[in-house]
Image (cartoon, rainbow, N blue to C red):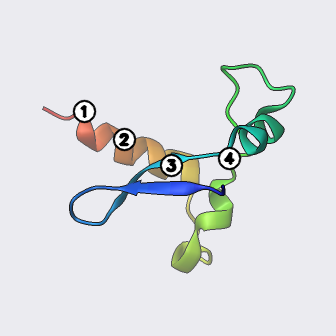
Amino acid sequence: MGVQYICDADGRKTDVIVPIDLWESLTAGKPADEPIGVAEPARYRGIYRDRDLDLETEARNLRNEWNRI
């Protein structure tokens, strides 16, 4: 059995089922509160790669938009 995706009524992926042996290999030696993988936002800049942006500031600004009243 491989990785399985669960989709909603509109066909969007909402969840994933990961075999336990794969999960254990991904999380081996990591505390439960430590994120899995390495967050490197610069890898995902796409069309914005050549712009002079501070990604952390931009992400913070986007998050703050949701907190406006």
Q: Is residue 20 above or below residue 18?
A: above
Crowdedness of circle 1 by 10 Å Cα count: few (<14), some, many (20+)? few
**Spatial distance from mark 1 to mark 2, Cα to Cα?**
7 Å
Secondary structure at numbered mark 3: strand
**Front: mark 2 or 3:** 3
Secondary structure at numbered mark 1: loop
Which disc, if any, is residue 67?
1
Q: Quick one: quadrant of the C terminus?
A: top left
Expressed as whole percent of the image width and height from the top left, the position of residue 30 reads 80, 26
Which residue corresponds to the image point at 19% horizontal and 35% vertical from the top-left?
68
First along the sequence among labels 2 and 3:
3
Which residue does the numbered mark 2 point to in the structure image? 63
Expressed as whole percent of the image width and height from the top left, the position of residue 40 reads 69, 53
First along the sequence among labels 2 and 4:
4
Q: Mark 1 and 2 residues: CB-CB less than 8 Å, in contact?
A: yes
Which disc, if any, is residue 16?
3
Tell which of 46 and 37 is nearer to you. 37
Which residue does the numbered mark 4 point to in the structure image? 39
